[in-house]
Image (cartoon, rainbow, N blue to C red):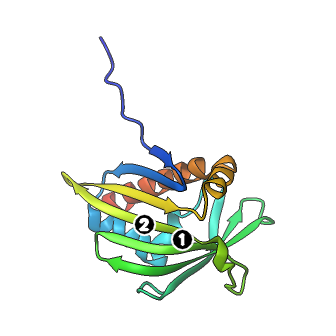
């Protein structure tokens, strides 16, 4: 007997300076959106395998920001980031400028990545589409070579596991 082939969990495509990544989550759209918009959720799943959020300050409104620190399991390696919200449409869309920052939240405005997260309802599930527009195709290529798609895949695996857990508790 043949086994049904499973669809890949993550689909990605590069076009010029834009990276598109999508995945379907077995959770209602409102819950997936909430997981992206509240610190109490983000600290439980954000980041690739082996990393955790050690700082997570969220001001979820247009003009607000999310400032965070990812820490590796060695507790020595840290990466600060800042997302400045540009547009929020509950529960459909979040648009933000994504930056590498320092501990104080200072960023290089010239290195922004414009991220649009679209949350689409699909028969009780949620299709999440991440559109990341880089300043150039070269900047995108360098970031992909550093493991961006794998990092998103691992982060979204953690999100899927977290969503399963909070729906069954």
Secondary structure type for disc 2: strand
- Picture coordinates of residue 104 (x, y %)? 71, 87
- Picture coordinates of residue 89 (x, y %)? 30, 77
- Picture coordinates of residue 17 (x, y %)? 55, 56
| Residue 112 seen anywhere in this rendered image of the structure | yes
From the viewer's perspective, is 143 left or right of 96? Answer: right
* Front-lying residue, 20 or 59: 20
Q: Please state which of the two labelled residues, at mark 2 or mark 1, is closer to the viewer.
A: 2
Q: How many marks?
A: 2
How far is mark 2 from mark 1, CA to CA?
21 Å
The residue drawn where x is 51% and y is 47% is 14
Give the labeled residue for mark 2.
Answer: 116
Disc ID at residue 153: none
| Residue 58 seen anywhere in this rendered image of the structure | no
Figure check: 4 above or below 62: above
Which residue is situated farthest in the right direction here? 76
Give the labeled residue for mark 1.
Answer: 43
């Amino acid at each position: 007997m043949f086994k049904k082939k499973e669809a890949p969990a993550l689909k990605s495509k590069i076009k010029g300076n834009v990276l598109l990544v999508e995945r379907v989550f077995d959770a209602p759209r409102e819950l997936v959106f909430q997981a992206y918009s509240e610190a109490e959720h983000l600290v439980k799943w954000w980041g690739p395998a082996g990393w955790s959020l050690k700082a997570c300050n969220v001001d979820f409104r247009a003009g607000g920001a999310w400032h965070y620190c990812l820490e590796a399991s060695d507790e020595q390696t840290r990466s600060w980031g800042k997302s400045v919200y540009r547009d929020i449409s509950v529960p459909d869309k979040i648009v933000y400028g994504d930056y590498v920052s320092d501990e104080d939240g200072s960023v290089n405005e010239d290195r922004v990545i414009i991220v649009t997260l679209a949350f689409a309802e699909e028969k009780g599930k949620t299709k999440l589409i991440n559109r990341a527009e880089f300043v150039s195709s070269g900047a995108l290529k360098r970031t992909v070579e550093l493991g961006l798609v794998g990092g998103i895949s691992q982060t979204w695996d953690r999100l899927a596991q977290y969503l399963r857990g909070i729906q069954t508790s």
